[in-house]
Amino acid sequence: MKTMTAARILAGLALAALIPMSGCMIFGIASAVGANIEKGKEIEVLAKYRGLENKSVAVLAHTDMRTAYEYPTALPNIVGNVANSIQKNVGGARVLDPRYSVSWMHQNPGWPTTPLADLTSELDVDRVVVVDVYEYRLNPEGNSFMWDGVAGANIGIVERDGIDPDSYAEEFQIISKFPDMEGIGKAQAGPREIEIGLQKTFVDQVSYLFYDHIEAKYPDRGIRRK
């Protein structure tokens, strides 16, 4: 009897000793799952600039000569896709055909130095969205075997009816990166896939400035008002 009682006591102590450990493990697992769920949440993000609504709009983009030479399709693609996104998602926006905008840019190579007020009058629109791309690359500096795409730009909005038409009514800075993980090399993806991914990420971020949208609660991106 004493032996059985002692065995029960030992078993009870062993069970009691296991309970806190199991509780900690469950709590740890639950915390990890909760963190992943929280990280994967989506939220509604309001537009940072609503001045394109019910307005005529033109989209222009420029960069330095070296970048334009190395990536000749970058600016036309950015102009076209940002324009299409604004047309599709901004209420009442009437966007100038991006093909005309790109043609006008080529015919007027000195347009970046044109007074801002003249841009709206020459294009005959209420608003001009200027995308000044100051960085655009697919590889890290000095390493052509790995992919580390970055697109950085200052975004300025010209208002024809603004208080000062020769100054930007609003300015933002955007930095996009693609891919969003390290260690991706030429064995895993080619330059076309990386550039398409980078442009898609960049165009989304630029366009999101102008309309309410849903995005990840904790996005790995940089957008800030200047």
Image (tube, rainbow, N blue to C red):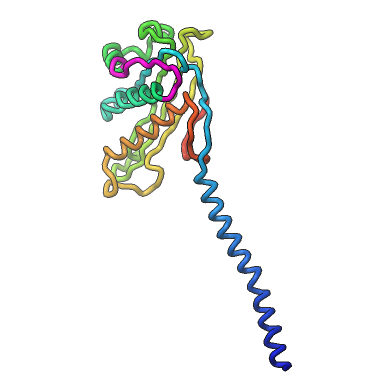
Q: State whether residue 56 is above or below residue 226.
A: above
Q: Quadrant of the N terminus?
A: bottom right
Label tally? 0
- Residue 131: x %, y % from top left: 40, 22
Q: Residue furthest front?
A: 92
Residue 194 in the image, given as x and y percentages of width and height: 31, 39
Residue 96 included in the magenta stretch of the image: yes
Nearer-the-camera pick, 2 or 120: 2
Res. 141 image quadrant = top left
Span of residues in magenta: 89-101
* Residue nearest the observer in this picture, 224 or 21: 21
**Residue 85 placed where, x, y %?**
38, 25
The answer to which quarter of the image holds residue 152 is top left
> Residue sitting at 46 percent across and 36 percent down?
221
- The residue drawn where x is 68% and y is 79% is 12
57 lies above or below 204: above
Q: Position of residue 195 (x, y in %)?
A: 31, 36
Camera-side residue of 202 and 40: 40
User: Is 77 part of what is drawn in magenta?
Assistant: no
Camera-side residue of 24 and 109: 24
> Going by the image, does 1 lie left or right of 110?
right
Residue in view at x 73 percent, y 93 percent? 2
Q: Residue at x 27, y 27 (%)?
A: 73
* Side of 124 where 166 appears, left or right: right
Query: Is residue 102 found left or right of 118 in the rendered image?
Result: left
